[in-house]
Amino acid sequence: MSTTWTGSGDETRRLLRLLAQSESGNSGWPPAVAWDWRNFAQACYTHRVTPYVYCRLQGLTATDVPDGLLEHLQMRFQEACARNYHLAKKLVDLIPMLENEGIPALAYKGPALAMAVYGGLAFRHYNDLDLVIRKEHHGKALRVLTGWGFQIVPKPALPRVRPYLGRPEDPRNVERTQEIEFCAPDSTYYLDLHWQLGDRFWRPFNPDVEKLWGRAEWQYLPEGRVSTLCREDLFLALCAHGNVHRWVCLKWLLDVAELLRKAGTLDWSRIEEMVRIRPGAAASASVAVILAHDLLEVTVPPEIERILPVTPRTRALATSVQEELLSQGQSSADEQATLLALQARRVERIKYQAYRIIHYPDGLFREIFVQVSPKDRALNRLPNKLQFLYHLIRPVRLAVKHCVRMARTLWSTAI
């Protein structure tokens, strides 16, 4: 099977129907003879939901599953099981070792999330381990881990305006970023060491990292127990993480949906208190809830609608992401467009836009010339051989859009 996937709205719709766990059984699922399963299997891999899909397909009748699909997914499921149990064992060993050095650590995502949300290690795809430490332990953790043989994964070439990002020990790096990536001594896994849950622009959309420790919970894994984020902090952190990547991977939306399907295990009064002082977290969670409801058919209890109200801003962003997923098979992964859409204060949007232009000019180039959105395609439906013209249509459309917006602003000011 090919390892590349060009993106398909049809395959994504089929995948969403399966992830939705519709009570109507096989409704909308095509007969086995009606389609080629290879692109669907690649979509499962691209969106990192292969283990979950394999378990769901076992509930369908044999006539609904194409020959070869279940066998292919079973092989991937078994590979994921072996990897996931290996990582869980490493996690249970690593956290006490750090604590013995005076570095408390919380498990984040990975095995702890799989057990807390899905009830088993095998049902969620993950490739690395994530730990959260206190910021004041950053330097000590760096020395301890490298002393144990962990290798810092170098960042790609960085512009001259931010050379400190290539030096993990630099205080500016600690203040402005959120993690360091390590390769394990045996090279069998990677470790992301966090002291924040997002960079400085995304922190208002996450739970307060300083308060994670007082709300931490134990999570029991097959090899032992680890300390991890409480379910309420986990919910808000997962919503922010999905938004920062514009939900390009459906695994992140499925995580949120599974938490919402067990809404009775969440303390919504605690979440209400948390978002009252962090309105950005409320906006981020609102987008996630809209997407989980619209794409994965999650029932939204009344208390969620009250605590995380839908606003024109969150609805517009969720609609934009949905259009990209359903038309292209994946979202654009445009962090800038997502953050700017969620920022309530114009001054913060301007500051972030200036920061991105100065520090990440390559991202601006991709946004204008490389990515293609549903709005670009809606202007004119081009045949496959002329698809490259969308990259010329996009900058023209953006120029017209912003010129019109500027003219309206000037006109409203003048009158």
Image (cartoon, rainbow, N blue to C red):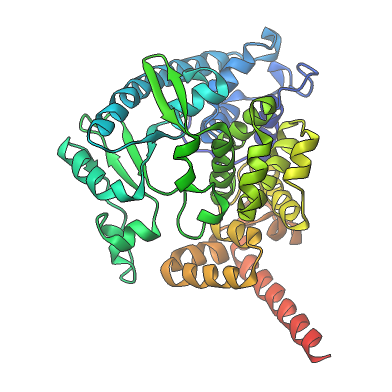
Question: What is the number of callouts on the image?
Answer: 0
Judge by depth and name the residue closer to the eye, 272 or 141: 272
Where is residue 255 drawn, in percent x and y? 58, 32
From the viewer's perspective, is residue 323 above or below residue 15? below
Q: Nearer the viewer, residue 339 or 159?
A: 339
Which residue extends farthest top?
A: 62
Does 283 appear above or below 84? below
For residue 124, say whether it is visible: no
Q: Quadrant of the C terminus?
A: bottom right
- Residue at the location (42% across, 68% down)? 359
Identity of the residue furthest to the right in this view: 415
- Residue at horizontal 76%, vertical 48%? 309
Q: Position of residue 35 (x, y in %)?
A: 68, 24
Q: Nearer the viewer, residue 233 or 157?
A: 233
Q: Is residue 375 left or right of residue 249?
A: right
Single out the residue that lies furthest toward the bottom.
414
The image quadrant of residue 362 is bottom left
User: Where 216 falls versus 338 (above or below)?
Assistant: above
Rendering coords of residue 313 (x, y %): 73, 58
Residue lying at 25% horizontally and 34% vertically, measured from the top left: 184
Asked if one can make out residue 352 in the rendered structure from this viewpoint, the answer is yes
Instruction: Give the percent coordinates (x, y) of residue 223.
Output: 36, 15
Q: Quadrant of residue 11?
A: top right
